[in-house]
Image (spheres, helix red, strand yellow):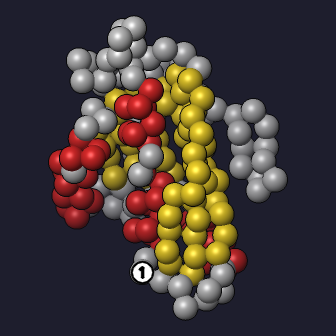
Amino acid sequence: MTDSPTGVNRDPDTQPLRADPPAESLRTRLWRHGFNLLPAYRGTGARVDHIAADWRYIRIRVPFNWRTRNAVGTIFGGSLYGAVDPVYMTMLRRTLGDDFTVWDKSAAIEFLEPGRDTLYAEFALTDGEIETIRKELSPGESTDREYLVSLVDDDGTVHAVCEKTLYVRRDE
């Protein structure tokens, strides 16, 4: 994969999972439990493991079990996509606040290796990313933001890569 015109790195992230993710707050811990109870997300078989207090980091896991296994004995691709689908939109909505509208615009997923173990994905927004969006948009203006997330096993092997494009608009 290559760099996009917007500067998003298209290479899969093969870094191991963070051993010391940013701390959760009581509020984000409650959000995490609520998210995991949401029927649409629960149906994917995935679970949100961690939400940082500032909503700029989230970790999810997709266990390999009877709920996520497909007919050929690997993790169902729909579970993988469903697990990552709402995360960046939720993070941006929580981080940017009510002055912004955020919608999923498009997505693509590439399956690289069959998943036969629990897979994880980490989502992060930098201060620079949030500041760029706030500075770039005047009231009524919009932009598309692209994000890439890898689904990896415990060893850091990338099994799938999902590219998400989000529409962000500053409300008037």
Q: Is residue 28 left or right of residue 5?
A: left
Identified by mark 1, the residue type is Asp
Q: Of helix, strand and loop, which one carries label 1?
A: loop
Q: Is residue 85 above or below residue 45?
A: below
Q: Is residue 36 above or below residue 132?
A: above
User: Which of 72 and 91 lies nearest the eye of the viewer?
Assistant: 72
Q: Is residue 154 visible?
A: no
Point 57% across, 81% down: residue: 170
Q: Is residue 75 visible?
A: yes
Res. 129 image quadrant: bottom right
Q: Is residue 41 above or below residue 29?
A: above
Q: Residue furthest front?
A: 71
Q: Position of residue 108 (x, y in %)?
A: 59, 39
Point 21% across, 47% down: residue: 39
Point 44% across, 17% down: residue: 115
Res. 109 image quadrant: top right
Q: Position of residue 113 (x, y in %)?
A: 54, 16
Q: Residue furthest top?
A: 72
Q: Position of residue 140 (x, y in %)?
A: 62, 86
For disc 1, the neighbor class at 10 Å (few under 14, some 14 to 19, many from 20) is: few
Number of dots carrying numbers: 1
Q: Quadrant of the image for the C terminus?
A: bottom right
Which residue matches tag 1?
98
Point 22% across, 64% down: residue: 27
Q: Quadrant of the image for the N terminus?
A: top right
